Image (cartoon, rainbow, N blue to C red):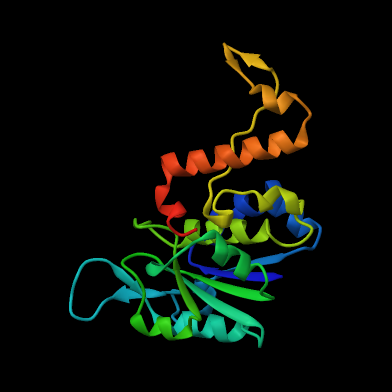
Amino acid sequence: MRIDILTIFPNMFNGFLTESIIKRAIQDKYVDIQIHDIRAYSKDKHKKVDDYGFGGGKGMVLMPEPIFDAVEDIKTKDSKVILMTPQGEPYKQAKAYDLAKEKHLIIICGHYEGFDERIRSLADMEISIGDYVLTGGELASMVITDSIVRLIDGVIEKDSHLNDSFNNNLLDYPVYTKPVDFKGMKVPEVLLSGHHANIEKFRKEESLKRTKERRPDLLEKR
């Protein structure tokens, strides 16, 4: 898979690309992630990519031409273009699975007070990671990228994500490690029993219980 991210702050991605699972996935060639500075596509001598919006109002708006030129330069027949915006479709685990099957994603990071409305015409989908506003789409694009890359075959063991929270509209069951007794808080006996059927039953029950207590809305979708 290839992921191209368009941003006016490319240095924000330095740590993201050089740590943990993302770093290993890139090194092992499961994914190719490229960061593109939108300013490189500006025809302005000062590399300007934003301006005041028509009709007044505070803040700067990203201009369409540099972003159109960037997408047209990068796009292939396999590309899906994602626009990060708080007005987009709420992001869910099911969408992460869908996107992990794509060959090429182009993610556009908005910033400032937003982007010229005509930029929307480039997008195959608009995505929001939550009902709140960030200073830009960079952090949101990292969330999307991380959630997708870990689902690519070979990046992590498949069993590691099959039981993730939100799969089957359930939260994940509780997990424990050593010591067995920590400050009076003990590991449930069933997990020490070695009885796989009982352990599986316990985990399913705890997953349902946790979902009912914390996210009952998820159970309504089952």
In percent of the image, x 70 and y 21: which residue is there? 178
Which residue is outermost to the top? 184
125 in relation to 153, above or below: below
| Residue 178 vs residue 28, the one in the foreground | 178
> Does 82 sit left or right of 48 as displayed?
right
2 in relation to 134, above or below: below
Query: Percent position (x, y) of residue 95?
Result: 55, 66
All told, the count of numbered labels is 0
| Residue 54 vs residue 200, the one in the foreground | 200
Query: Percent position (x, y) of residue 73?
Result: 60, 84
Which residue is outermost to the right? 28
For the question of whether residue 83 can be seen, the reply is yes
| Residue 96 vs residue 73, the one in the foreground | 96
Query: Percent position (x, y) of residue 171?
Result: 53, 46
In percent of the image, x 40 and y 52: which residue is there? 217
73 in relation to 88, above or below: below
In percent of the image, x 53 and y 50: which residue is there? 170
Q: Quadrant of the N terminus?
A: bottom right
| Residue 91 vs residue 9, the one in the foreground | 91
In percent of the image, x 56 and y 64: which residue is there? 94
175 in relation to 4, above or below: above
For the question of whether residue 43 can be seen, the reply is no
Query: Percent position (x, y) of residue 40?
Result: 54, 75
> Does 48 sit left or right of 175 as displayed?
left
Quadrant of res 129: bottom left
